[in-house]
Image (cartoon, rainbow, N blue to C red):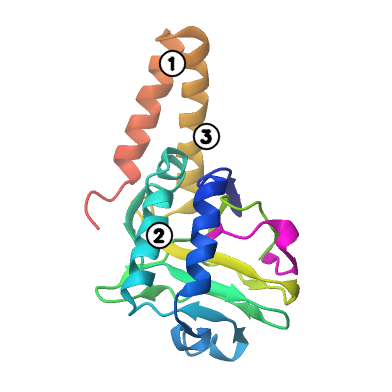
Amino acid sequence: MSLFCIADVMDAEACARARDEFARLPSRDGRLTAGWAARGAKNNEQLDASDPGVQALAARLLDAVSGHPTLERFARPARFGSPLLSRYRPGQGYGTHVDDALMGKPALRTDLAWTLFLSGPDDYDGGELVIESHEGETPVKLPAGALVVYDCGALHRVAPVTRGERLACVGWIQSRVRDGRQRELLFTLDQTRRSLHAREGESPEFLQLSQVHSQLLRMWAEAAC
């Protein structure tokens, strides 16, 4: 599973409020926050993280993402990196790159990346997040308030915007379960046992699946990160 999408992380009113704040808050050249290898590929603006208003908006958006129960079950987060608030205007994009494996101090191991879309798909042309995998390229352009999570090891880019304005919040997760295949298996087991419980209650089959899920999580999870 190279990516995972979650709808309605934020409602329309919250997204509209975030867009209004974007227009009022100070921004700077996005290349200032890129790693040395990605700096030449990056052409966007980011809100100035040193501004208290930007910090408050970033904290509110991160709360919406980190508090979502589906993300918790899929990502098994141990730590979240500081999010970036990005703006792409016509002619701006972000060429193919890979995110740094370690970010910040103390270092965050970037197992997963996420993008929370704040602009709707009709607000701009172009601007797709394009994620590469062995199966090919997957363009992602979600409704405002939706989230995509993907493997940080994947090559990816943001296609140039040709009309309008693309606003998004991006961030990174260090997972308690380092291996992506293990995370996906745990998530599938959890979804299956929840569906079974909704249909049959605490059946013997539900209890067996719960036992397997618990034992695998105990085997694979890092207790402290």
Q: Earlier in the sequence, mark 2 or mark 3?
A: 2
Disc number at residue 154? none
Disc 1 target residue: 206
Q: Looking at the image, do the residues carrying marks 2 and 3 touch, with CB atoms under 8 Å apart? A: no
Answer left or right for 10 relative to 211.
right
Name which residue lies at 75% across and 58% down.
122
Q: CA distance from mark 2 to mark 3?
A: 20 Å
**Viewer-closest of 159 and 56:** 56
Dot 1 or dot 3, earlier in sequence: 3
Disc 1 element: helix
Identify the magenta region: 115-130
Q: Nearer the viewer, residue 78 or 220?
A: 78
Q: Where does residue 45 sit, x and y in percent of width and height?
A: 55, 81
Q: Is residue 38 left or right of residue 103?
A: right
Q: Which residue is mark 3?
A: 188
- Dot 1 crowding, Cα within 10 Å, few <14, some 14–19, many 20+: some
| Badge number at residue 173 | 2
Residue 15 in sight from this viewpoint: yes
The residue type indicated by label 1 comes to Phe
